[in-house]
Amino acid sequence: MSTENASETAPLRLTADELSIATGNPEKRTAVIDSRAVPVWTFSGKDADQSVAGTISRLPADCRGVKVEIVVAAAGGAENSGLEDVYRLHLSQGAGKAPEDTCEEHMTPVRTALSAAPGLPRTIELESYCATAPDRPLTVRIERCPGDPADTCRCPTDLLLVRVTPVKAPAAPFIVEDAPGYNSWPMLQAIGPKLVCAYSRGRGHDIVESCRGVYARTSGDGGKTWSPETLISNAPDCGEVTIGKGLDADGAMLLWVRCWGAMRRHDLYRSADGVTFTRIATPVLDPMPMQITDIFPVPAVGLMALWFAGNYSDDGQNSWGTLTSSDNGATWKQRVIESGLPKSEWPTEPSAVCFGNGRIFAVARTECLENTTERAQFQLESEDCGATWTRSRTNIGDVALSTPSLVFDEATGLLSNYYFHRGRGVLKRRVVKLDRIIGNPLAWPEPEPVALGSTAFPDAGNVNASVIQNMHFLAYYSGTAPDTFVAVSAAAAPAGATGENAVPGKQD
């Protein structure tokens, strides 16, 4: 069984005539678009809090979520080159009772580049999947955000159309572990045709609790069924958490375990079968990473993992870098890439792939929670086997402490970026040709929903990917404290991908 992407039905439309002022003073007028006179709502580009709203009278009976797009056009032409505008979606769906029962959900601002052609319409996806109830009205409000840091266009823009596409929910995932307790932070690794899922269990969202241990199960049927639980480690003096995985040069699984207590360390375990794990290294590191992420091979270097260190504050202690091993994981050399970073510029929980000629590509989570386009995944690039790096912010803003996990298919050049949008309860995938986004971090395409989980924050998230043939397998956790479960979903590799050369990246 594979988890199919959420299926869509015919879109529902709201024209400018079906929208009205919600906030501020947008202007209703007639514009000429493609030689046709059409009604539009014009946002000034300077005045904040301008929005319009309309209502879909009834969603279909099989609808479990919606995708929302808008069609906009901007005045001007070549002078818009390099400029961007930002829009934000707000949704509300009452229970059919008193107005006060209706609660508006505020989505993530979305940035896009303006067209150099004057008045050329653009379609912008504001939300790929937002859970909704069937057989009820849905009110859609569209806001332009000139106060957002990414909105650099000050010319007016016209809203022509809102398109709402009902979406059916993806298939349910397979359950790996749902014993009482806070089952969380899974790492997933394929050893040949076998999946190995290592995870941590404690009482809550707490990495220090001494009762927290590390366990593993295996599956030989693509995640449908899982072996009995194996204990990897449960030391009484610290909390232990799975933080990174990979394969060594012999094809055995490597697993990083963070041990946090009075003493702090990171242990590296090795397993040839996913059942018996042996500790092979405890490197002495300075600065001490908060986390070491997935292990991947780099020709002429050996094994590499990225790490980050800090206290999740602006105390000047935030840094990140690389660990490399030339002896198959027995010893590791640490290198600092950036240090003294403010929390808003600190890339955490990165996932990386090496794609030839010493080039390494990674994406990383942001610790920023403010709901602007500044809250977006980071993109990290190296052309010299990890000696030097460039860091930039992407247009992937539908995140909230969302850990990414990359899968790269060498045969097709397709890169899949998986991440769980915490608080929204949606595991998403963005697929792109890797050469399209090298040096171009704002060119990521729109996401697609792959699986669903709890909307409880932060009790669901942290996806970690692995590959068997033409299937991508995705481990994450979900539920509500104090009891959460570890799940695995399966998604077919993107069209054109063979899967034979697919390489998963990193995570915690």
Image (cartoon, grey):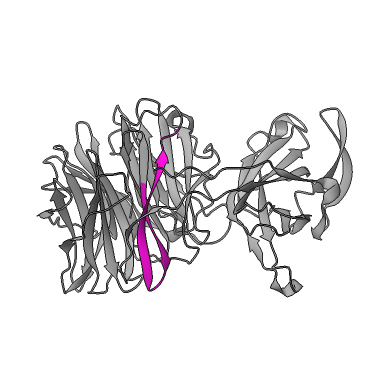
Q: Where is residue 139 in the image (x, y as percent from the top left)?
A: 73, 58
Q: Please tell me whether the stretch drawn in magenta is mainly helix, strand or loop.
A: strand
Does residue 46 show up?
Answer: yes
Does residue 108 show up?
Answer: no
Residue range in magenta is 474-494
Magenta highlight on residue 484:
yes
Magenta highlight on residue 258:
no
- Looking at the image, residue 341 lies above or below residue 102: above
Give the quarter of the image for residue 3: top left
Q: On the rendered image, what quadrant is the C terminus found in? A: bottom left
> In the displayed structure, does residue 167 sit left or right of residue 75?
left
> In the displayed structure, does residue 428 sit left or right of residue 178?
right
Q: Position of residue 61 (x, y in %)?
A: 66, 53
Image label count: 0
Of 204 and 181, nearer the camera is: 181
User: For the point 72% across and 55% down, which residue is it?
Assistant: 140
Q: Position of residue 265 (x, y in %)?
A: 18, 63
Of 303 and 211, nearer the camera is: 211
> In the displayed structure, does residue 3 sit left or right of residue 268?
right
Q: On the rendered image, what quadrant is the N terminus found in? A: top left
> In the displayed structure, does residue 441 sit left or right of residue 467?
right
Of 96 and 90, nearer the camera is: 96
User: For the point 70% across and 36% down, which residue is it?
Assistant: 122
Of 109 and 387, nearer the camera is: 109
User: For the point 11% across and 41% down, which residue is it?
Assistant: 327
Q: Where is residue 450 in the image (x, y as percent from the top left)?
A: 47, 46
